[in-house]
């Protein structure tokens, strides 16, 4: 019978676990896989691209800007006198409203183009393109703009100045969480504000 010596390499039983070398190799592989998960590089079983930091687009909110408009407003007196009522507004809108009217109005009431464009549910870029291409506003947007101008003309008559009227527009009315300016984004909303101005003119405002 052959007796194995204690120091004989053949006498050692093979290890059932991982050797130190294999552990290091396994650690490196896991680290590489972790890196691939973060960076999305090849080498791991699962690839997940790290989320990119995207700068959110600036959202223009009327509620946030209403305090900073109209401070240097001029006067609409003697301007846009062809706006005499709903019939004149509709007829003008159907014929096509020159985009330059938008810019003249914005300059007079001292409101940035992008804010006024937002009220009309469009963008300053779109209106700029219309101007460059010589296009007129669509009837719906043209009517919206002309009704808005008519409202501001009425507001100036009642409050004496555009600045005072625009200050009134920026303040929520009693019993409402919305300021009148927030209603101007639709023609119907303009009608509601106009009715409120009539009540003020006749002393029935709340």
Image (cartoon, rainbow, N blue to C red):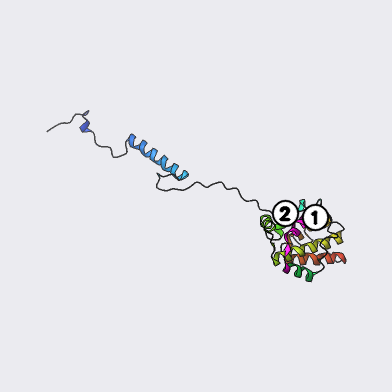
Check the image and name the residue furthest to the left: 1
Please name the residue that numbered disc 2 is placed on. 113
Q: Residues within 10 Å of mark 2 (few under 14, many from 20)?
A: some
Q: Residues within 10 Å of mark 1 (few under 14, many from 20)?
A: some
Please name the residue that numbered disc 1 is placed on. 108
Horizontal side, residue 179 vs residue 18: left or right: right
Horizontal side, residue 8 vs residue 74: left or right: left
In terms of image quadrants, where is residue 206?
bottom right
Front-most of residues 143 and 28: 143
Check the image and name the residue furthest to the bottom: 87
Q: Earlier in the sequence, mark 1 or mark 2?
A: 1
Picture coordinates of residue 72 (x, y %)? 81, 51
**Magenta stretch containing residue 99, yes or no?**
yes
Q: CB under 8 Å between callouts 1 and 2?
A: no
Picture coordinates of residue 121 (x, y %)? 68, 60
On screen, residue 89 above or below 99 = below
Residue drawn at point x = 74 percent, y = 58 percent? 100
Image quadrant in which the N terminus is located: top left
Residue drawn at point x = 66 percent, y = 55 percent? 125
Q: Secondary structure at mark 1?
A: helix
Q: Secondary structure at mark 2?
A: helix
CA distance for labels 1 and 2 = 11 Å
Q: Is residue 198 visible?
A: yes
On screen, residue 26 above or below 9 = below
Horizontal side, residue 140 vs residue 3: left or right: right
Front-most of residues 153 and 168: 153
């Amino acid at each position: 019978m052959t007796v194995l010596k204690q120091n004989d390499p053949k006498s050692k039983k093979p290890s059932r676990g991982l050797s130190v070398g294999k552990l290091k190799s396994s650690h490196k592989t896991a680290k590489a896989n972790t890196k691939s998960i973060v960076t999305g590089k090849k080498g791991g079983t699962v690839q997940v691209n790290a989320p990119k930091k995207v700068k959110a687009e600036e959202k223009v909110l009327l509620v946030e800007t209403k305090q900073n408009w109209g401070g240097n407003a001029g006067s609409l007196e003697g301007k846009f006198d062809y706006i005499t009522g709903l019939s004149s507004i509709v007829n003008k809108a159907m014929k096509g409203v020159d985009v330059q009217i938008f810019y003249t109005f914005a300059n007079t009431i001292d409101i940035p183009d992008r804010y006024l464009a937002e009220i009309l549910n469009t963008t300053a870029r779109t209106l700029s393109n219309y101007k460059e291409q010589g296009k007129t506003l669509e009837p719906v947007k043209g009517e919206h703009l002309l009704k808005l101008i008519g409202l501001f003309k009425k507001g100036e008559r009642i409050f004496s100045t555009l600045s005072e009227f625009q200050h009134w527009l920026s303040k929520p009315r009693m019993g409402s969480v919305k300021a009148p300016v927030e209603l101007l984004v639709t023609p119907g909303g303009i009608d509601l504000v106009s009715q409120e101005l009539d009540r003020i003119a006749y002393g029935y405002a709340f």
